[in-house]
Amino acid sequence: MMSFRAKAVGIAGAATHGTASLLVTAVMVAASGTAVAQQLDAPIEERVRGNESGVESQKRVEEIASATDSLIAEFRLTNKKIESLQIFNRQLSQVIESQNEELASLQRQIDDVEEVGRAVTPLMLKMIDALDKFVALDIPFLAEERKDRVDSLRVLMRRSDVADAERYRRILEAYQIESDYGRTIDSTSGTVPKNGEEVPVDFLRIGRIGLLYQTRDGEEVGVWKRNDDGRGGEFVQLDRSDYGNWISEGLRVAKKQAAPQLIRVPLPPPTKGGSS
């Protein structure tokens, strides 16, 4: 029995020893695995950190590249604007140069106009004087109206707000009116002196050929007769039997009460110098 127990104890001891060995081995294996794991984790972590750093670097590179592209695009746009401005400036310079030339030309024209104005003014004054003299020597129709027209031209010449061109136009207009009188027939009312009195009459003007009159009662007719020297004149009575009907008919034509027709009028004799 004792022998059996001893063996049993030996077996149990052996078993206990084997278990301890296994535990030690397991612990060693576990420790070894941990060490290996630790040795493997270090490079992996380093690799992971490297990858993370690479991602950040790549992101940074992409950001820099994007910013660079934006700067390049902005630079190109700025260059295009600069080119456009340069083209505009060149064009503007040409326009300014052309305007300066036009201004210089206008200034020359202004200077020429002022010079012409200094030469034209005496001429216009002479034209007004000639017109005034012509009216004074002409047959006396519309005397007040025509004299007022000449006087208005003299006033016009003294006004500083009227250009020479307008003055000249008005003078030519007055000449044209006087010229038209020579091609028209007209009837006006007025008076003629007789025995110290002014007798109301109807005047018949036929161009500048003659100025005739007829009293309102139709009993007397007459004509303007120039003096021999051509300066001034007077109204003289005509034979009513010779000219009364013709003058009456002429007055009707002038008043547009009858159709135009040939009428008989007395012609004044030639004056000295060939004027009539």
Image (cartoon, rainbow, N blue to C red):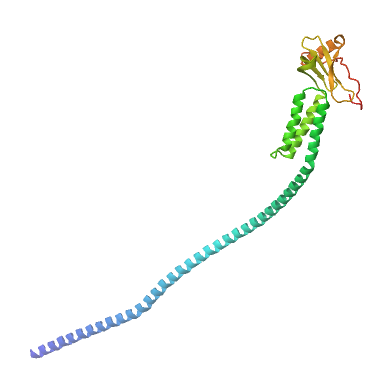
**x and y, in percent, of residue 24 in the image:** 23, 84
Q: Is residue 273 left or right of residue 72?
A: right
Q: Reply above or below: 120 against 130.
A: below
Farthest residue, direction front: 196
**x and y, in percent, of residue 103 in the image:** 71, 50
Q: Nearer the viewer, residue 201 or 185?
A: 201
Count of labels in the image: 0
Whether residue 259 can be seen here:
no
Q: Is residue 239 left or right of residue 187?
A: right
The quadrant holding residue 42 is: bottom left
Q: Nearer the viewer, residue 104 or 44?
A: 104
**x and y, in percent, of residue 128 in the image:** 79, 34
Residue at figure coordinates x 39%, y 74% from the top left: 49
For the N terminus, which image quadrant? bottom left
Residue at figure coordinates x 67%, y 56% from the top left: 93
Q: Reply above or below: 227 against 239.
A: below
Q: Reply above or below: 117 against 135.
A: below
The quadrant holding residue 131 is: top right
Q: Nearer the viewer, residue 236 or 221?
A: 236
